[in-house]
Image: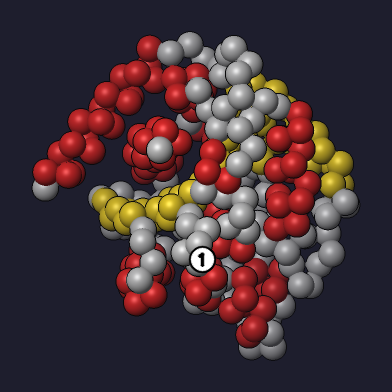
């Protein structure tokens, strides 16, 4: 209880700090992607001053796009300025799931993120280009994407945050265009296993530790898969932060989640 009280006080202080800060600048970056075979946009939110700073990649959910976070949670401008971090809001497609589809060669999102977008950000902007100063977070489909990318590329990411994440795709064989990406589950069960975060937790490497965070609302349809992921993390003895709060699968919940994440990141990037 004592720890929880201290965390809450820090959160309130952090929110007040963000509210006093001036909004950061926003660029729209268009990157010609070989992996996706098209031009892909991303928003880049930079604090004033131009000094090298840590980077947070913030992923949207299914049916969304790269503008969602700024449109629905404009306070991210103040977070970027107050904490002196760069926030990148990429486009993951309406149903791209941030993975390399074994069925569609125009849906290679893991390759796009790891081999194209991330190096482009480090090349075009003054970042602190080391894994310890780089984090990735997302909601729903983006929560799955954040953990998927971090577990498969721990050399690139120091922290990964899932908000209401669909951390196991296997219970949803007919949803969100997943059969189009992975093939029918009955015909390609290994595709579903290999591309579900729940089937990849064994990839966690203690030698390249990623700070893992997952939270989910008590009224969220992804609550069960988050609880199961927590149990598997316990079984594998992987350290993590888990929050389960009142709320559903909506922006009210995610905006509050991001407040907690920003407090965590402020400490994480300092350490």
Q: Residue at x 30, y 53 (%)?
A: 243
Residue 75 x, y percent position in the rendering: 46, 25
Q: Residue farthest to the bottom?
A: 187
Q: Residue tagged by mark 1?
A: 205
Q: How many numbered marks does the figure carry?
A: 1
Nearer to me, 213 or 269 = 269
Q: Is residue 256 above or below residue 213?
A: above
Residue 166 x, y percent position in the rendering: 49, 62
Q: Residue at x 11, y 43 (%)?
A: 2
Residue 132 x, y percent position in the rendering: 52, 43
Q: Residue at x 59, y 79 (%)?
A: 193
Horizontal relation, residue 243 to residue 201: left or right: left
- Colour theme: secondary structure
Tag 1 secondary structure? loop
Horizontal relation, residue 264 to residue 2: left or right: right
Q: Is residue 29 visible?
A: yes
Q: Is residue 212 above or below residue 48?
A: below
Q: Residue farthest to the left?
A: 1
Horizontal relation, residue 72 to residue 103: left or right: left
Q: Is residue 142 visible?
A: no
Tell me the quadrant of the picture where the C terminus can be found.
Answer: top left
Residue 125 x, y percent position in the rendering: 70, 27
Q: Residue at x 82, y 53 (%)?
A: 36
- Neighbour tally class for label 1: few under 14, some 14-19, many 20 plus, Cα within 10 Å: some
Quarter assignment of residue 235: bottom left
Nearer to me, 101 or 79 = 79
């Amino acid at each position: 209880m004592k720890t929880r009280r201290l965390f809450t006080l820090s959160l309130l202080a952090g929110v007040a700090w963000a509210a006093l800060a001036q909004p950061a600048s926003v660029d729209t970056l268009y990157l010609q992607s070989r992996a996706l075979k098209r031009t892909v946009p991303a928003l880049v939110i930079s604090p004033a001053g131009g000094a090298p700073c840590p980077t947070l990649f913030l992923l949207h959910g299914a049916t969304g796009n790269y503008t969602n976070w700024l449109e629905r949670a404009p306070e991210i401008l103040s977070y970027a300025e107050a904490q002196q971090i760069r926030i990148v809001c990429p486009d993951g497609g309406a149903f791209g799931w941030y993975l390399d589809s074994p069925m569609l060669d125009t849906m290679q999102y893991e390759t796009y993120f790891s081999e194209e977008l991330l190096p482009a950000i480090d090349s075009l902007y003054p970042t602190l280009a080391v894994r310890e100063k780089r984090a990735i977070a997302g909601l729903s489909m983006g929560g799955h994407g954040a953990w998927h990318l971090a577990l498969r590329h721990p050399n690139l990411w120091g922290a990964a945050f899932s908000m209401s994440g669909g951390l196991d795709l296997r219970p949803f064989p007919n949803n969100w265009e997943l059969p189009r990406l992975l093939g029918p589950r009955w015909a390609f069960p290994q595709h579903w296993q290999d591309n579900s975060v729940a089937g990849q937790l064994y990839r966690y490497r203690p030698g390249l530790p990623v700070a893992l965070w997952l939270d989910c609302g008590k009224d969220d349809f992804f609550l069960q898969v988050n609880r199961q992921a927590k149990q598997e993390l316990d079984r594998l003895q992987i350290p993590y932060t888990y929050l389960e709060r009142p709320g559903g699968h909506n922006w009210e919940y995610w905006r509050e989640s991001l407040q907690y994440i920003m407090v965590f990141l402020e400490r994480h990037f300092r350490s």
